[in-house]
Amino acid sequence: MESALIIGQSPSLIIFDHANHATEKNLAFSKELHNGIPESWIIEIIPDDMPLPEDSRDESTFWIRRPVSEEEWCATLENVLHKNGCPQWAKWTQHKSYRGF
C-alpha cells in the first residue's frame, strides 16, 4: 500500500482483517484509512461477535463477518471490483455482504 501511495496511485482495494478481536487502535487506524484514501474500497473482516461501529453506515465500507462464505466473498468482490470503480462514484445497492442493515 505504501508503494502505491508514494507514486500517487491509490490502491483500488484494501482488505483489513480485524482478526479475533478488533482493538480501539485498529478501529482508529481503519477510520484513518477511510478518511485518508476515500477513492479506495476498504473491506473489513470482523469477528462474528463484534458490534459494528456507530459510523458503520458509510456506503463505501464493507463489513464482512467471519467466517466468510465463498458466496458472500464473491458478491463483495463483484461489487467493488467490477460494478463500481471507486466508492465516490458507486451507486449504492444493498447486497448480501453488507450485513446488519
Image (tube, grey):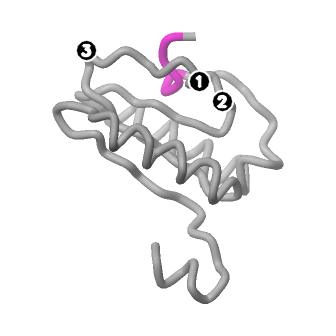
Residue 82 falls left or right of residue 89: left
**Magenta residue span:** 96-100
Q: Quarter-wise, where is residue 36 in the image? A: bottom right
Q: Which mark is residue 12?
A: none
The answer to the question of whether label 3 and label 2 lie on touching residues, with beta carbons closer than 8 A, is no
- Residue drawn at x 72%, y 47% is 87
- Look at mark 1 in the image and give the residue it sits on: 55
Most frequent secondary structure within the magenta stretch: loop
Percent position of residue 28, x then y: 44, 41
Given the image, on which type of amino acid does mark 3 rest?
A: Asp
Percent position of residue 68, x then y: 29, 32
Q: Secondary structure at mark 1?
A: loop
- Look at mark 3 in the image and give the residue it sits on: 49
Q: Which mark is residue 58?
A: 2
Residue toward you, 85 or 39 = 39
Given the image, on which type of amino acid does mark 1 rest?
A: Asp
- Residue drawn at x 40%, y 30% is 64
